[in-house]
Image (tube, rainbow, N blue to C red):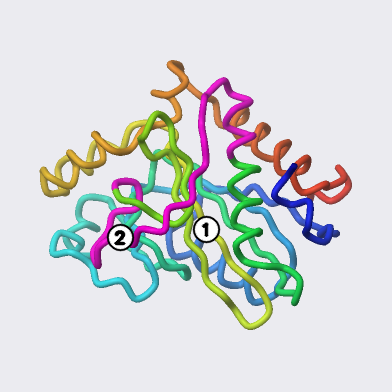
């Protein structure tokens, strides 16, 4: 039985596929959507390589905005918590769900994981979503350490998720690693951090054994989202 079986049906979803924007613009859009509290599923790419820090997360020494800007890397704070994420070869998603008394956060997170997992499986990848109660370290890297909800392939992390509660909604953000990290990260990351990404994370293209076209991935994820959340085609914008 679907993990969503006990949840009320969510009507009037908007599905958005955003153009590549600056890191700050993407995070500002997610926060604005969370404050409107309209049910939203959004997919987006990053304009250039970026590092996003979880809300109020202290940055490690190598994440110095001025120095990274000189390498063409943006630094931004996410509205949600979670570990440090690196962007530029990933497809990110954000989900806004209005708060209601009967709508438990755990079931919402499971529903998001279920939809993303189904979408990835459509591309021929054997992926599972997990719920891990282990807490990451104070300075954590999203795709290298345990997190409460994640998509895994053969024990390696493909996608991590983070959440924040707003006055009238939940905001869930995720990052699905599609291709190899932008080469510039090998130059700026400490060797042990870059090595941890190589060893503990996995790209969708590595798992699939082929290149993944953006349009194929976006189509698969939106289709899985509609089916999982019982959407009608008229809900998409």
Q: Quadrant of the N terminus?
A: top right
Out of 133 and 71, give the one closest to the viewer.
Answer: 133
Disc count in the image?
2
Q: In the displayed structure, does residue 4 sit left or right of residue 68? A: right
Residues rendered magenta in the picture = 117-144
**At which x and y percent is residue 79?**
47, 70
**Res. 185 image quadrant:** top left
Please identify, in this view, whether the residue under mark 1 or under mark 2 is nearer the observer: 2
**At which x and y percent is residue 40?**
70, 59
Q: In the displayed structure, does residue 65 sit left or right of residue 176? A: left
Q: Which mark is residue 173?
A: 1
Q: Which mark is residue 156?
A: none
* Residue 133 is a magenta residue: yes
Tell me the residue that label 2 is attached to: 136
Whichever of labels 1 and 2 marks the residue nearer the N terminus, that label is 2
* Residue 67 against residue 32 in the figure, above or below: above
């Amino acid at each position: 039985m679907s993990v969503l079986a006990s949840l009320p049906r969510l009507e009037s979803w908007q599905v958005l596929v955003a153009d590549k924007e600056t890191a700050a613009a993407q995070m500002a859009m997610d926060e604005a959507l969370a404050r409107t509290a309209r049910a939203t599923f959004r997919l987006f790419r990053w304009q250039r390589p970026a590092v996003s820090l979880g809300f109020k997360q202290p940055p490690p020494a190598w994440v110095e905005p001025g120095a990274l800007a000189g390498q063409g890397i943006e630094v931004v704070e996410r509205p949600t918590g979670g570990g440090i994420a690196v962007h530029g070869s990933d497809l990110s998603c954000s989900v806004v769900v209005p708060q209601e008394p009967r709508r438990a956060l755990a079931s919402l997170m499971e529903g998001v994981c279920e939809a993303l997992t189904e979408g990835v499986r459509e591309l021929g990848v054997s992926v599972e979503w997990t719920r891990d109660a282990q807490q990451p370290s104070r300075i954590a890297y999203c795709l290298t350490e345990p997190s409460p909800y994640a998509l895994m392939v053969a024990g390696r992390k493909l996608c991590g998720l983070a959440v924040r509660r707003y006055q009238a909604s939940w905001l869930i953000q995720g990052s699905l690693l599609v291709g190899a990290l932008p080469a510039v990260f090998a130059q700026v990351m400490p060797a042990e951090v870059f090595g941890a990404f190589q060893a503990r994370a996995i790209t969708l293209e590595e798992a699939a054994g082929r290149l993944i076209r953006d349009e194929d991935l976006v189509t698969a994820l939106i289709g899985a989202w509609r089916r999982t959340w019982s959407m009608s085609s008229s809900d998409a914008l």
